[in-house]
Amino acid sequence: MKRLPTLLACSLLASASASAAGRTASTFRYKPSPDDERPVIVDATIGPQGSDFAMRLKFNKDPFGEECKQRCANITLFLDTDSSVQSGLHLPANKAPENGADLAVVIQGVREYKRQDAPPEMTLRVKIRQLNSDATSADGGELLADLNHRQDPERIQTDGTTVYLLVDATSALLPSARRVRVIYHPPGSKALTATINGMAGGGSGRGVQIFKRGKGWGRAPDAEGKKPRANADGDNG
């Protein structure tokens, strides 16, 4: 993979207090448990960028590749794009924090066997599903996108343990509001929730610029100085 150029980053809120210009406030942070066998998100910055939700997701270890072997990333982020439990996912548990989520973003490190006589390809795969009121799991709803870092570099790029992702929010049936709930439920831990600006907030174009500026790619300031990641890393089980 080519080296990511320098990134212009703007602040992203995880609470009502805004950070100073030029700094980035994380949407949420998570301290991994010793029992977490698979890579988990430890720091996420998420917000509207144009017509997309831009994400910078830092894992505690490589989300795909030889290091994690058969135990690579397999996580789901939920976005409640209208902050309402009336629309979106309805889990059997009435008070589940994921209830009301309108988008499920599933991130997996996978190994794909293209040919029997060739080694597997390591890939970071992202599935995005829109969840309507009939959805009772993250697998329900309509599949909006099935992406991977090899074929969709305009949507996904990686830099070591950091994943940059753009989630298209232009579906006509996707509800929108001024605020969006973000839910991440690490295995064996309580769900983490945060509130970010929504697409109806009037400032989506000035949201987070953590991902892309013009035709170039960038990375957050604290990722500066990292060496570029080599081609073909990925994995899962």
Image (cartoon, grey):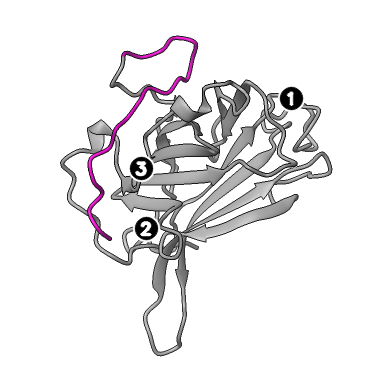
Label 3 or label 1, whichever comes before in sequence order: 1
Give the alpha-carbon distance from disc 3 to disc 2, as whole Å: 34 Å
Residue 77 visible here? yes
Q: Which residue is mark 1?
A: 84
* Amino acid bearing label 1: Ser
* Image quadrant where one finds the N terminus: bottom left
Answer few, some or many: residues within 10 Å of disc 1's Cα (few below 14, many 20 plus, some between 14 and 19).
Answer: some
Left or right: residue 75 versus residue 164 is right
Residue 107 in picture, x, y percent from top left: 51, 51
Label 2 or label 1, whichever comes before in sequence order: 2
Badge 1 element: loop
Residue lying farthest to the right in this orientation: 134
Residue 207 visible here? no
The stretch of residues the image draws in magenta is 1-20
Q: Which residue is mark 2?
A: 68
Q: Which mark is residue 9?
A: none
